[in-house]
Amino acid sequence: MTTESADLISEIKQIMAQYRREVPGRRRAWPEAIKSRVKRLNDNGLSLYSIAQLIGIPYVTLKNWERKQKTGGFRAVTVKTSKPVTTVVPPTAKCPTTVEGQTVKPLTVVGSEQSSSIAITHPSGIRIEGLSFNEAVQLSERWLGL
């Protein structure tokens, strides 16, 4: 183990001790300071299993951090279109996130390919109901400038 790795492990243990003193409860989110140091240890060649044993955080937790870091925190899911589906499309530069000083939600599409009553809510608050799936997609693309 390198000197840098030993220093990182020491720092993690100090941060963990302070964190446990200051944050009550068992289920708590680990601070980013620990996560970043674990990533550096892993980048330096230590396996997640070894890191887990050295610092006392479960291996599964470290594996979840690695997965979230690689995927941005999201997992792919399969959606069946026979039931209503909600799709949130993030706003683009053409879709304001504030209207008259109020924060607005991203464009929301509710419905499915078989549904005859799809509703779309624009970030500005405009809601259009009763669209077919294809009409909803076309309107969403226009609103988002795609």
Image: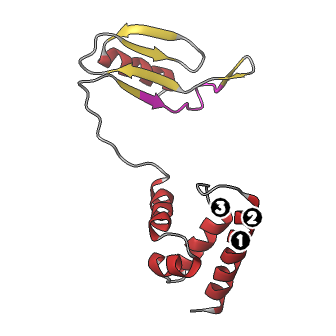
| Left or right relative to 81: residue 36 | right
Q: Residue at x 49, y 26 (%)?
A: 145
Q: Position of residue 79 (x, y in %)?
A: 29, 35
Q: Which mark is residue 17?
A: 1
Name which of mark 3 and mark 1 comes first in the sequence.
Answer: 1
Q: Is residue 88 magenta?
A: yes
Provide the residue span drawn in magenta.
87-97
Q: Position of residue 66 (x, y in %)?
A: 48, 64
Q: Closer to us: mark 2 or mark 3?
A: 2
Q: Are marks 2 and 1 in contact (CB under 8 Å)?
A: yes
Q: Which mark is residue 21?
A: 2
> Is the residue 61 above or below the residue 1 in the image?
above
Q: Position of residue 63 (x, y in %)?
A: 45, 66
Q: Secondary structure at mark 2?
A: helix
| Nearest to the observer: residue 65 or residue 143 | 65
- Spatial distance from mark 2 to mark 1, Cα to Cα? 6 Å
Q: Is residue 139 magenta?
A: no
Q: Residue at x 45, y 21 (%)?
A: 142
In the rendered image, the residue lying farthest to the front is 25
Name which of mark 2 and mark 3 comes first in the sequence.
Answer: 2
